Amino acid sequence: MTLALLAAPLQASAPAWGHGEIATLKRWISAAPLDALPVLPTDRLDAATTAGDADAMETQATSLALRLARMHLLGSASVAERSGWNINDTDKEMDLEPLLAAAVENGTLDAFFATLRPRHQEYSALKSAYAKEPDEAKRTTIGRNMERWRWLPRSLGGNYVMVNLPKFEAYLWRDGMKAGAWPVIVGKTSTPSVVFDTTITGVTLNPWWEIPASIVRESIGSLVRRNPALARSRGYVWNDGRYRQKPGPNNALGQMKLVMPNPYSIYMHDTPNKNLFAEDVRAFSHGCIRTGDAIGYAATLLQGVKSREEVDAIVESGVTTTLDLARPLPIYVVYFTAVADGQGGVETLRDLYNRDRRISVPPPVTGCGQE
């Protein structure tokens, strides 16, 4: 059931809470630890119920239900715990009050709360594993990543790219199904890749490399000044006040770069250092995401625009060419240290950038009922 269906018909501007609806709410509050969420205190609601104060019951029940709904939808973490997570959660724009009022009016509170959870199958896998995991440390890791899923839009749509930094992999989803996976190299611990979202609009084949100022200061600038002949042989040029590298097999971007505008200057691209994909821990970049089988990846994204043979011919020509995708594609660069293993379980990953400890997870509560 969708939230739109839950909202109609709306016959009251405020919920009219009865004892049945309050019992349902309290059951969901007590079951919050099943989603690695804290249990909200119900003492004020209990006092109003005992006193038979209908107005206070309605006020307290509505307040608690909205708090619980926002935790399921948006997470319970503080601003500090979310530090470094730069993905826009469009769920923040959802007006929950009329949806809650309709759910109380229509007797659909169970569906209301259940529908607010992340829809992705990865979240379902984590939730199932969390309930059964006996190891406290692993259970905490799973809980932290359940919380991260709530920081994403509840629905990512059917078509998107997701890059999981601790897994060193990128995934293409089409029509709600995983359509491909590619190994990636991510930022070093000293220059970590950013967690963010944007849109892939195209692919540039045989790209020029616009060298960031930090890398100019680190090495390229001095090379161009002290040994211009060597710099030229490596394709480095300086003109109009900027340092660039010509297209070619030795270009730092390799032979492909995605067009994915973002304020962090982080891109997915090819690399001449193909040997690094043999490493298990692939944290070697200055922050950008280097992609294995980059030309195959580009050709997959360009399906419906250019064939693989046409892509190969452009690469072979050496001419810088930018091709638009058939449709812009959302991309989410994420940080999940617990993922479904594809066999009904969950795999925990190395906390590459030491971010897990920022996120608190409530202790398990025994005896909480399954909704």
Image: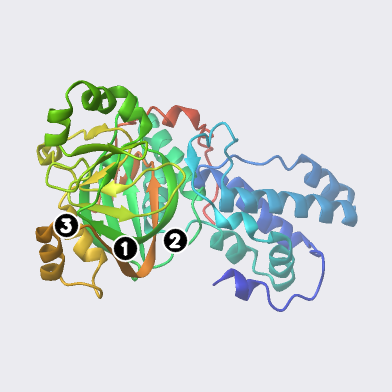
Q: Are marks 2 and 1 in contact (CB under 8 Å)?
A: yes
Q: Earlier in the sequence, mark 2 or mark 1?
A: 2
Label disc, if present, on residue 295 of the rendered structure = 3
Q: Is residue 59 above or below residue 4?
A: above
Task: Name the residue nearer the viewer: 368 or 229.
Answer: 229
Ranked by sequence position, the earlier of labels 3 and 1 is 1
Q: Which residue is mark 2?
A: 156
Please name the amino acid that badge 2 sits on.
Answer: Leu
Dot 1 amino acid type:
Trp
Q: Secondary structure at mark 1?
A: strand
Label 2: which secondary element: loop
Q: Residue at x 64, y 72 (%)?
A: 6
> Number of numbered discs present?
3
Seen in the image, is 18 located left or right of residue 314? Answer: right
Q: Position of residue 369 (x, y in %)?
A: 54, 50
Report how far apart the C-alphas of labels 3 and 1 lie in the structure: 18 Å
Measuring from the top left, give residue 318's x and y in whole percent. 14, 56
Residue identifier under label 1: 173
Residue at image location 38% in from the left, 47% down from the top: 333
